[in-house]
Image (tube, coloured by chain):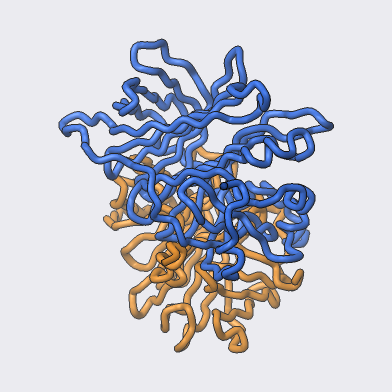
Amino acid sequence: MNLKDFPRAGDGLTQFAKPPCYELEGRSFFFVMDGGVDYELRFTGRATLTWAADGTEPAPADYDCIKADDDTYLVTFRVFGDGPIACHSYVIDLAQRLVTRHTCQAGGNPRHPMLLDNHYDFGAIRTEGYALPYKRHHFTDDLLGTTVEWHWTTDLVSRHAYVQTNFYRVTWEEGSSMEQTFEEEFYAIPATDELARYVRIKEGIYLFVVTEEKVERILGDDQPFRSDSMLFIENFDRCFHVGRAFGAMMVDGVPEPLYMIYGAFGNTLELPASQLSEPNRYHV
Amino acid sequence: MSLATRGLRHGIGQYRYPHSYQLEGSVFTLTVEGGARVELAFLDRSRMTRTDADGGAELSVYECLPVAADVYFVSFEVGNRFAVLDLAAGRAVLIDADAGSHLIGMIEGFGGAAAGETPADDADMSGTTVAWVLGDGKEVRQRFLAPGTVQQSWSPRHDRAHDCAAIEIPLGRGLYVVDVRGFAGPRLDVPQGLGRLILVQDYERMTAVGAVLSTVFNERVLLSGYGRFLDEE
């Protein structure tokens, strides 16, 4: 057998996902949230937990956990109910005893029922013997001016420019695998700017969440991926990211649920000034 | 300023994965080649003991990096020793860089591996040329010339390739432990003198985790990164 013949596990965006983390098994966390509704997570197994809003019955879920640094964990799971599937994600920051909760779910927009609504809440981890911290993770403009090239797989490389506090711009090398994979979609829209939010977790570590809303509004059924939420923890101290995608993808013309864990390695990137200075086409 | 430049100070250690604390509180009993038993007890996040068959116990600081699901690379501060623990297959490799020994063992209670046995489905690495990117623009290139011989070069001087003695140990599922007695001269991205490179290479994901070290300077840098086959370019 040749080394090249090994099946390329996780071809696509998942190839460079970091190994799964099982360290939280057996632990419980109570999150005191600024939104006024507190949450408890109990990690009952390597991939199972129960979650509950304070005062409600715990519900089971299958979770994924990946580490963004030694003490920062991304925990994400889907919640199945009568309506559209929801995705709940927590950035559990044990070093600062802080937490960020992100949830998203489709179904809130009657004209575009696949659009995802995002909700963010910040809070602290209740820890016996310690006062609750006053500090919080927070929305930030720290990333503005940063350009970075992300290697998702051996072949797939995307270029991110963080251009505005609520948008990012994705570009690619001409003729690259990225262009070949997404060419049809990219050239069918007026710009590759997309809605994004940036949250500072700590020095060098940021939560970055993209929702592919513009492309969903413009292309609707004529695209492979539908209003995906791509949630990253970007570790610029090491220049890698970990994350998850949630939404839907078209299979034989029918949207099917999409959920995956991914990761990438980054490097510095100088983008042409023209790509950075181009105005956001979606803004007046 | 771009935040992407922030990690450059780590050099070839830039892409190192977060430490894993998964082994904290675990005790593994290994049966190695020849039937000897070794116990590894991970006391907490940073301290462990190794107890050999003769009862001699050694306390050491350790660092652990995840390689793949249930596979860990452990660096012991004492004695330039390393362990690769494949809990999925129940296989372990104990590396003593000072002594130049590689013990292949089975982990009691995990998987079905036998001591000293490597998987039968291992690939022939000969003829493969691969680059492992360990930081921004920083890579090591390895050309597997024949079993036991790797031609290796470090960025930015890939014109200075050296034929090096190497040991390749297949773990199965595309995983290989590759230990190269290499060369780390001046003006390379690898710190000068840290010529010994031990990587657990995952050919299913094209990622690698390991360390570069010097047994005489007693220094090491833990590494992670991604790979690409060069002869495909």
Q: Residue B179: name its quadrant.
A: bottom right
Please tell me whether residue B230 is drawn above or below residue A222 in the rendered image: below
As drawn, the residue found furthest toward the right would be A252
Given the current orientation, which residue lies at the most extreme front position? A284
Q: Position of residue B29 (x, y in %)?
A: 42, 45
Q: Residue at 46%, 71% (x, y): give it.
A: B12
Q: Picture quarter containing residue A106? A: top right
Per the rendering, the colour in which chain A appears is blue
Residue at (36% x, 80% y) in the render: B216
Percent across and percent down for residue B148 are 63, 74
The correct choice, above or below, for B74 with respect to B147 in the image is above
Q: Position of residue A47 (x, y in %)?
A: 51, 30
Left or right of B2, for residue A7? right
Q: Is residue B67 visible?
A: yes
B92 or A162: nearer the eye? Answer: A162
The residue closer to the viewer here, B161 or A207, is A207
The chain displayed orange equals B
Q: Quadrant of the C terminus of chain B?
A: bottom right
Q: Residue at x 57, y 69 (%)?
A: A273
Q: Nearer the viewer, residue A142 or B222?
A: A142
* Residue A216 % position (x, y): 68, 37
Q: Is residue B87 visible?
A: no
Image-based side of A111 in relation to A250, left or right: left
In the rendered image, the vertical position of residue A191 relative to residue A83, given as above or below: below
- Work out whether residue A118 or residue B196 is closer to the camera in this orientation and state it: A118
